[in-house]
Image: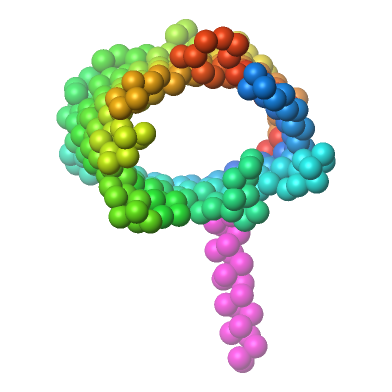
Amino acid sequence: MRHSNKFYILLVVFLILNQLIWADSSAFIGAFGNYQYSDDTSVVTHTKNVGIHGNFDFRTLIKENGFVRASLYGKVLYDPTAIMFNDLIAADFDGVWYGNNGELSISAGSEFSLGGYMGSLPYWKPVWEASYQIQRGYRAINPYFTYLGSAEGQQLFNELRIGFSHVPIIEFSYFAAAGIGFDSDFSTSETDTVANLLMTMNGLSGYLLNWTVQGSASYRWSSDANEEGFSGYVSAQCTVSPNNVFQIQISPLYYWEYNTSTHMWDRYLKATLRADVVVTEHVYSYLKTSVTIEGLADASPYPLGIEATAGIDIGF
């Protein structure tokens, strides 16, 4: 009788796990090759890596009141020249609950590396966020409030934001927010204050072209004169999907910093081009190339970086 009970318990557990893993889930695994070129005007380096990566994503509805999603992503890189492995693992959980007058979303995640990643030492970086948006109806301005945080080593960052979203037409939406953050370093017992302004615009043109433009401006108050000053970025992303087989994406980024103590500027420009091709229903190939130009505030020649990645993924 005891063995029979164990059998039924194992059967129930198997059925539950089977439902969780396959009913509302997706996954992919893939292999890729990566090449990096760096020219800092004094030393030229070439780096070649091969790697594998994979992702598992689970999502389910909470009746009619919302949904939850969990995902796990892993990547392993191997540099045959240096005979070195790099790894990256990211786990995320998201939950959204809908009410009569608002929407509550909570997320928590963690990024870590066991052996180091792209020159960094092993690390662990948890992140978390909670947001509540007041729903005032379609085409209305909907305010929201957000708390977010992250930690890494002896650093702890917390930020409070207040903003709004607006969808005047179905093909266009935008978001804006202002925030105040606190960046604490427990090794020095010092805390910097950071003020942020952020804006995002999204658009759809002809159901074939999606675009996004983002911008941010920040000011950091710090007891370290080398850290205090302004910073910001403007980025864009344009995705063209002429058919269900081919897709191309262009992503430029401009970043700047200004130190109020030294009156020094630091700027860099990065542009990424990515092309995706559907080989079969479950097989996808892609090619991604990025060009980065640093030190735009200095006299030429400018440090140049080029990165190219080609890979193939199999979806389940």
Quarter-of-image position of residue 135: top left
Q: Is residue 149 above or below residue 33?
A: below
- Where is residue 209? Give x, y as percent: 50, 12
The extreme front residue here reads 262
Which residue is more in the foreground, 23 or 55? Answer: 55
Q: Nearer the viewer, residue 147 or 71?
A: 147
| Color theme of the render | rainbow
Instruction: Identify which residue is drawn at 61% across, 91% down.
Output: 2
Question: Relative to 226, does residue 290 appear above or below in the rendering?
Answer: above
The residue shown at (19%, 22%) is: 140
Residue 55 percent coordinates (x, y): 62, 44
Relative to 298, 279 lies left or right: right
For the image, the number of numbered tags is 0
Q: Which quarter shows the C terminus?
A: top right
Residue farthest toward the bottom in the current orientation of the protein: 1
Secondary structure, magenta segment, majority class: helix
Q: Position of residue 106 (x, y in %)?
A: 34, 48
Instruction: Work out whether 280 lies above or below 94.
Output: above
Quadrant into which the N terminus falls = bottom right
Residue pictured at 38% horizontal, 21% vertical: 264
Q: Is residue 160 visible to us here?
A: yes
